[in-house]
């Protein structure tokens, strides 16, 4: 009975919430929060543009995630056009959202591992190495995805602008059209900011995860004996040896 209880106590996972006081755990918590902000604002960037024409029905174009402007058309009078001839925005938007969703799940999984498996994480060298590899990969994902999505947002603003659509609609070339509703881009712009903030958080986490690996610990262990050896070395002749002869007062030599 005692042996059974001892096995249960050993195998039971103990929650360690002190990890949130360490940079590694605190950054994972921030990664979880900012990843949600990043993909949520990117997905909620829907907007619309309305163009009015004299004696004609208004032309209206609406766009939303994944911002496939190639399939979006607007008609004013007897002329119609698509907002884009290429599909260059959709891949960058989808990759950015993919990075955000997977980052949220990974940061949540790592946080749970830090809390519930702290002893195994510190004693088994495989856990920190896997943690480091995944962190490096998703750091690259964030800088690549944020850069591509930033260019995608620029293309959205350019291709859905009133001046660009006027050039595409022959009916509006004579100045018979007017802009009634302008598209809004606040959410997609904010999502780009959150994207680069997530890159900074994942890049900063690399160092603190690296400190838990055997590569850093072995390097630190090798440097400590060298420092101790240097501290024990003293320059020869720095202090003169004490005199072993004592002179008797009044004696000659």
Image (cartoon, grey):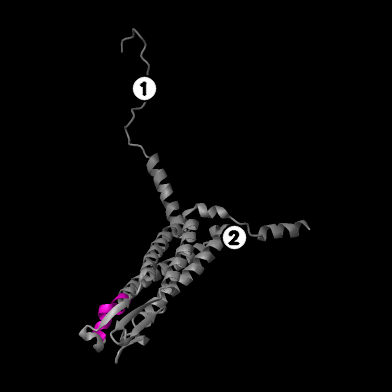
**Residue 220 or 121: which is nearer the viewer?**
121
The furthest residue to the top: 250
Q: Position of residue 148 (x, y in %)?
A: 34, 74
Going 34% across and 29% down the picture, which residue do you hit? 239
Q: Quadrant of residue 52?
A: bottom left
Assess whether residue 82 is covered by the magenta stretch: no
Up/down of 172 relative to 195, above or below: below
Kindly identify the residue that appears in the image at 63 percent across and 59 percent down. Answer: 13
Residue 151 image position (x, y, % from top left): 31, 74
Residue 126 visible? The answer is no
Q: Which residue is mark 1?
A: 243
Residue closest to the far bottom: 78
Q: Which residue is mark 2?
A: 116
Q: Is residue 9 left or right of residue 227?
A: right
* In magenta stretch: residue 164: yes
Q: Dividing the image into 4 quarters, which one contains the C terminus? A: top left
Question: Does residue 114 sit above or below 56 in this rendering?
Answer: above
**Which residue is more in the foreground, 230 or 239?**
230
Q: 12 left or right of 232? A: right
Say what secondary structure mark 1 lies in: loop
Q: Main secondary structure of the magenta part?
A: helix
Q: Residues within 10 Å of mark 1 (few under 14, many from 20)?
A: few
The range drawn in magenta is: 156-168
Q: In the orientation shown, which residue stands out farthest toward the front?
A: 55
Q: Secondary structure at mark 2?
A: helix
- The image shows residue 185 at horizontal and vertical percentages of 35, 71
């Amino acid at each position: 009975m005692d042996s059974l209880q001892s096995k249960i106590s050993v195998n039971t996972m103990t929650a360690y919430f002190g990890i949130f006081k360490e940079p590694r755990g605190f950054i994972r918590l921030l990664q979880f929060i900012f990843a949600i902000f990043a993909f949520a604002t990117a997905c909620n960037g829907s907007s619309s543009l309305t163009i009015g024409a004299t004696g004609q029905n208004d032309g209206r174009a609406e766009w939303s995630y994944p911002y496939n402007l190639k399939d979006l058309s607007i008609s004013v009078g007897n002329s119609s056009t698509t907002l884009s001839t290429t599909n260059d925005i959709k891949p960058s938007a989808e990759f950015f959202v993919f990075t955000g969703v997977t980052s949220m799940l990974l940061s949540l999984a790592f946080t749970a591992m830090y809390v519930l498996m702290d002893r195994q994480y510190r004693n088994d060298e495989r856990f920190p190495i896997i943690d480091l590899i995944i962190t490096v990969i998703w750091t690259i994902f964030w800088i690549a995805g944020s850069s591509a999505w930033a260019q995608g947002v620029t293309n959205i603003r350019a291709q859905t602008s009133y001046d660009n659509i006027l050039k595409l609609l022959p009916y509006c070339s004579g100045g018979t059209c007017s802009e009634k509703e302008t598209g809004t881009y606040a959410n997609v712009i904010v999502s780009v900011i959150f994207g680069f903030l997530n890159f900074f958080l994942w890049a900063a986490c690399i160092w603190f995860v690296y400190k838990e690996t055997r590569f850093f610990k072995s390097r630190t262990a090798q440097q400590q004996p060298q420092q101790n050896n240097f501290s024990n070395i003293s320059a020869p002749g720095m202090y003169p040896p004490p005199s072993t002869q004592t002179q008797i007062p009044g004696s000659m030599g």
